[in-house]
Amino acid sequence: MSAIHDVVGARDEAVDTPSEETNGEFRWVDLCDTDDISGELVRLGVPDLAVEDVVEADQQPKIEAYDNGLFFVIDAATYDDPAEAIDFHQLRIYFTTDLVVTVAPETLGVSRRLHRAFSTGRWHPASTAQIAYTLIDRVVDGYEPVLGGLAIDVAQVEADVFSPEATNPSERIYYLKRQVLNFTRHTAPFAGPLDRLRLHGHAAVPHELDDYYRDVEDHLNQAAHQLEQYSDLLNGVLDANLAQISVRQNEDMRRMSAWAAIFLLPTLLAGIWGMNFSAMPETDWRFGYPVALASMALATGYLYYRLKRSGWL
């Protein structure tokens, strides 16, 4: 059997939030996406095309309109800070003026908590559209701590790039870039359909809720703007990191070249004096050996001094 929670609620016009100017009752049926729910959807009178959409998991965020209802797909997100990974949990909502069907994994607590509040009478939504709005609003509000976690990690990786230690956080930068791109893929597609819904309307959404849906759209756009900033910042950090690596490699090459030149000079002098030609008067001189050593030491010391002053060592 499916894990079904079916609650009937009366439209309430006395609450502070916008209400629908109609009488009657509406139902909220909460389903778990691990169950076989197609039969239950047919029993509830959900159209066949909508049943296919509601049953299918792992869809791109979207809004689809049917003759008498709307279908929302939106992804909730949580941030695993130790792993620096974003986990996504998809929420699917089909609603008409008298029915709300939500499909979500057991791990998505926002749907379960609101449904409990609705079923126990602690929350009195005025319409099915208000239930749908509250759900997506809670999901979008949940993006803020994820963005905050990403901001901290992006700041940390930026500090690593410019730290005095010769670190190379390229792998972490690329990983965070993938997380930002993945987050954008799971959130940005919902903003466009939400804007079109607000502009063109639908019979299932009262006009009194337009401002509320626009507020969700604003929060989505703010999240998209922050993600774009993170992406640009990570691109800049990656370029700076590659430049730092190039600079360190150049410095290492200069040091190696400087030490090679220092050792080359005495090697050259020793090679010349080691040729043992007969017409080399210094080889028969009493002080020839100590003078040769002193010459090599002085030449090497002077070269080291010059290279040190020029910044090669």
Image (cartoon, helix red, strand yellow):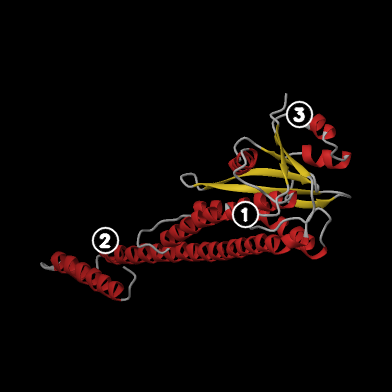
Query: Can residue 100 be seen in this snapshot?
Result: no
Q: Name the foreground residue: 94 vs 232.
A: 94
The residue to which callout 2 is attached is 274
Cα–Cα span, label 2 and label 3: 91 Å
Residue 104 occupies quadrant:
top right
Q: Vertical placement of 31 versus 260: above or below?
A: above
In this rendering, position of residue 3 left or right of residue 110: right
| Residue plotted at (54% across, 53% down) | 146
Query: Can residue 262 be seen in this snapshot?
Result: yes
The residue to which callout 3 is attached is 36
| Residue plotted at (78% across, 46% down) | 95
Answer whether labels 2 and 3 touch (C-beta < 8 Å): no
**Mark 1 residue type:** Val
Q: Element type at marker 2?
A: loop
Residue 200 occupies quadrant:
bottom right
Residue 268 point in image, percent of width and height: 31, 65
Q: Name the foreground residue: 273 vs 234.
A: 234
Mark 2 nearby-residue class (10 Å; few <14, some 14–19, many ≥20): few
In the rendered structure, which disc, 1 or 3, sits on the residue that comes first in sequence?
3
**Mark 2 residue type:** Gly
Residue 280 point in image, percent of width and height: 23, 69
In this rendering, position of residue 215 left or right of residue 129: left
Cα–Cα span, label 1 and label 3: 28 Å
| Residue plotted at (84% across, 32% down) | 43
Q: Element type at marker 1?
A: helix
In this rendering, position of residue 225 left or right of residue 97: left
Mark 1 nearby-residue class (10 Å; few <14, some 14–19, many ≥20): many
The residue to which callout 1 is attached is 140
Cα–Cα span, label 2 and label 1: 81 Å
Task: Report the quarter where the N terminus lies.
Answer: top right
Residue 90 point in image, percent of width and height: 67, 43
